[in-house]
Image (cartoon, helix red, strand yellow):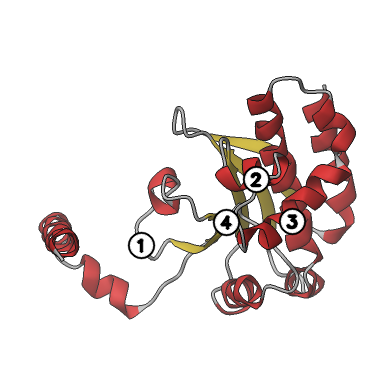
C-alpha cells in the first residue's frame, strides 16, 4: 500500500504544478478533447506517447497494446479508431513501434511465454512475409530492429485497410496514416516515410518504404 500511496502523492504534486503554471488548465481540459492525432503504440512502459511528442493531455488520442498491432478482429483497437476518426475527426493516425521491442523479439526468436504467444503470432506472420530479408541480417539485435520497422509498415497497411479509414477517405475526410519508430537509446523518433493519405497510394508507399529499408 505504501507504493500506491506514493502514486497518489505524485498525482497531487503534479496537479498542483500544472495549476501553478496554468490555473485554467484542468477547467479547459474538462470541457472537451479535440486531438488532431491518434497514436497506436506499444504498451511498453518506456514509451509514453504524450511525453515523446511533447503534447499535453487532450492533444493526443492513444491506443496501446503489445507490439503496436492493428488486428482486424480486435474490437478494442477498432473502436478507438472509429471514435477518433469519425467522432473526434483526427487528421493523423500514427502507428509507432520502438526498437528493442520485447514483443517483437519474443515473436522473432520464438520465446515460450504462454498465452501472449497467440497475440505475437501476428508478428510471426509479418516475419514470414519478409523472411528472406530478415535471414540476411546476421546480428540478432539488428534483425529484431528490422522486424520492428517491418511490423510498423504492415500495421500501417492494416490501418489503411479497415473499413473505418476507407470510409473516411471515400467521404473526402482529411486523414493521413504514418509509420514511425521510437528509439529507447536516444529518445528520438524515426519517420519510416510510410505516409499514406488515400487508398490509391497504399501499395506505392509500401513498396517505396520497403525499397529504402533494403538499400
Cα gap from disc 3 to disc 2, whole angstroms: 11 Å
Tell me if label 3 and label 1 are in contact, CB under 8 Å. Answer: no
Q: Position of residue 176 (x, y in %)?
A: 69, 56
Q: What residue sits right under mark 3 in the picture?
A: 121
On screen, residue 98 versus residue 208, left or right, reads left
User: Going from the N terminus, do you reach mark 4 or mark 1 first?
Assistant: 1
Name the residue at 74% across, 72% down.
Answer: 168
Q: Residue at x 15, y 54 (%)?
A: 21
Closest to the camera, between mark 3 and mark 2, is 2
For residue 18, say whether it is visible.
Answer: yes
Query: Which mark is first along the chain, 4 or 3?
Result: 4
Q: Are marks 2 and 4 in contact (CB under 8 Å)?
A: no
Asked if one can make out residue 193 in the rendered structure from this viewpoint, the answer is: no
Question: Disc 4 and disc 1: Cα gap in Å?
Answer: 22 Å
Label drawn at residue 66: 4
Instruction: Give the spatial CA distance, label 2 vs label 4.
Output: 15 Å
Identify the mark nearer the N-term, 3 or 1.
Answer: 1
Per the image, label 2 sits on a secondary structure element best described as: loop
Point out the tag, 2 or 4, that comes first from the N-terminus: 4
Residue 57, numbered circle: 1
Residue 69, percent from left and from top: 66, 58
Q: CA distance from mark 1 to mark 2?
A: 36 Å
Horizontal side of 203 relative to 96 (left or right) equals: right
Q: Which residue is mark 2?
A: 111
Residue 35 versus residue 135 in the image, above or below:
below
Foreground mark, 1 or 2, reads: 2
In terms of image quadrants, where is residue 12? bottom left
Q: Tell me where residue 187 sits by quadrant.
A: top left
Dot 4, crowdedness within 10 Å: few (<14), some or many (≥20)?
A: some
Q: Nearer the viewer, residue 159 or 91?
A: 159
Could you tell me which secondary element the residue under label 4 belongs to?
loop
Amino acid at each position: 500500500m505504501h507504493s500506491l500511496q506514493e502514486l497518489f502523492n505524485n498525482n497531487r504534486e503534479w496537479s498542483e504544478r500544472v495549476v501553478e503554471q496554468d490555473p485554467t488548465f484542468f477547467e479547459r481540459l474538462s470541457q472537451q478533447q479535440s486531438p488532431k492525432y491518434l497514436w497506436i503504440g506499444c504498451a511498453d512502459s518506456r514509451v509514453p506517447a504524450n511525453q515523446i511528442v511533447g503534447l499535453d493531455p487532450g492533444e493526443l488520442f492513444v491506443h496501446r497494446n503489445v507490439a503496436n498491432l492493428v488486428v482486424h478482429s480486435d474490437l478494442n483497437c477498432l473502436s478507438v479508431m472509429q471514435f477518433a476518426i469519425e467522432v473526434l475527426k483526427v487528421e493523423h493516425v500514427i502507428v509507432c513501434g520502438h526498437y528493442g521491442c520485447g514483443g517483437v523479439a519474443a515473436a522473432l526468436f520464438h520465446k515460450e511465454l504462454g498465452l501472449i504467444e497467440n497475440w505475437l503470432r501476428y508478428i510471426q506472420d509479418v516475419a514470414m512475409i519478409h523472411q528472406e530479408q530478415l535471414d540476411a541480417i546476421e546480428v540478432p539485435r539488428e534483425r529484431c530492429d528490422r522486424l520492428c520497422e517491418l511490423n510498423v509498415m504492415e500495421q500501417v497497411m492494416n490501418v489503411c485497410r479497415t473499413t473505418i479509414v476507407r470510409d473516411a477517405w471515400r467521404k473526402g475526410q482529411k486523414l493521413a496514416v504514418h509509420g514511425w519508430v521510437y528509439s529507447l537509446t536516444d529518445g528520438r523518433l524515426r519517420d519510416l516515410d510510410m505516409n499514406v493519405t488515400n487508398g490509391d497510394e497504399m501499395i506505392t508507399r509500401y513498396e517505396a518504404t520497403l525499397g529504402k529499408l533494403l538499400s
